[in-house]
């Protein structure tokens, strides 16, 4: 191997080793490091100190989806919106008993707030929320749903005849 290629290969290996050491996988439920990577460069090895994170009340690792479907019946402007919380543990205190803000992009907004019992380790979060809305005029609307306390949101576009 030519000397310049050998130097480039060693430098590239060192870069990948450092990147691997910095990217310790973390268990999404417990917040605990799941592996301890080791980087070896030129015969020397280095292992980062394992870290353990305490689970906190956040919506980390969760996101929202929003689906809009016209409801069957006589009103062609009636729409059922379905919001789904995806990811994160079922007992995530950061997503328990949070309000939902619906914005239908036609000037109509709804803010839903819940009354809930205190959270415990056995408490399960609500993952599906629905809301029925009727548009007054035809058009293309970009509706949005938010869980503001968790800084999550999703949008979808629907054509109303």
Image (cartoon, rainbow, N blue to C red):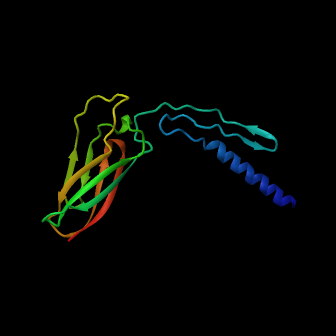
Q: Residue furthest front?
A: 72
Rendered position, 75 above or below 61: below
Whole-percent x, y for residue 125 in the image: 33, 38
| Relative horizontal placement of residue 157, taking residue 110 as reference (left or right) | right
Q: Nearer the viewer, residue 148 or 158?
A: 158
In depth, the one of 7 and 37 nearer the eye is 37
Q: Quadrant of the image for the C terminus?
A: bottom left
* Residue 42 image offset from top left, x and y in percent: 81, 44
Identify the image quadrant of residue 132.
bottom left
Quadrant in the rendering for residue 98: top left
Find the residue positioned furthest to the right.
2
Residue 145 in the image: x percent, y percent?
Answer: 29, 52
Residue extending furthest toward the left: 74
Q: Residue at x 79, y 39 (%)?
A: 44
Q: What residue do we see at 40% from left, 38% from top? A: 58
Task: Examine the rendered structure and indicate whether residue 53 appears above or below residue 83.
Answer: above
Residue 101 in percent (x, y) is at 26, 48
Count of numbered circles in the view: 0
* Residue in the picture at 87% in, 60% down: 1
């Amino acid at each position: 191997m030519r000397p310049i290629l050998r130097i480039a290969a060693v430098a590239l290996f060192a870069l990948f080793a450092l990147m691997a050491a910095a990217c310790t996988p973390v268990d999404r439920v417990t917040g605990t490091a799941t592996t301890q990577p080791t980087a070896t460069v030129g015969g020397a090895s280095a292992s980062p100190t394992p870290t353990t994170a305490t689970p906190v009340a956040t919506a980390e690792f969760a996101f929202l989806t929003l689906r809009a479907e016209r409801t069957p019946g006589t009103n062609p402007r009636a729409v059922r919106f379905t919001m789904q919380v995806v990811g994160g543990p079922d007992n995530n205190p950061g997503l328990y008993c949070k309000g939902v803000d619906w914005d239908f992009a036609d000037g109509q907004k709804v803010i839903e707030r819940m009354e809930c019992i205190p959270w415990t380790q056995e408490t399960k979060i609500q993952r599906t929320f629905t809301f029925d809305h009727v548009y007054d005029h035809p058009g293309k609307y970009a509706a949005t749903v938010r869980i503001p306390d968790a800084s999550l949101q999703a949008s979808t576009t629907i054509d109303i005849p």
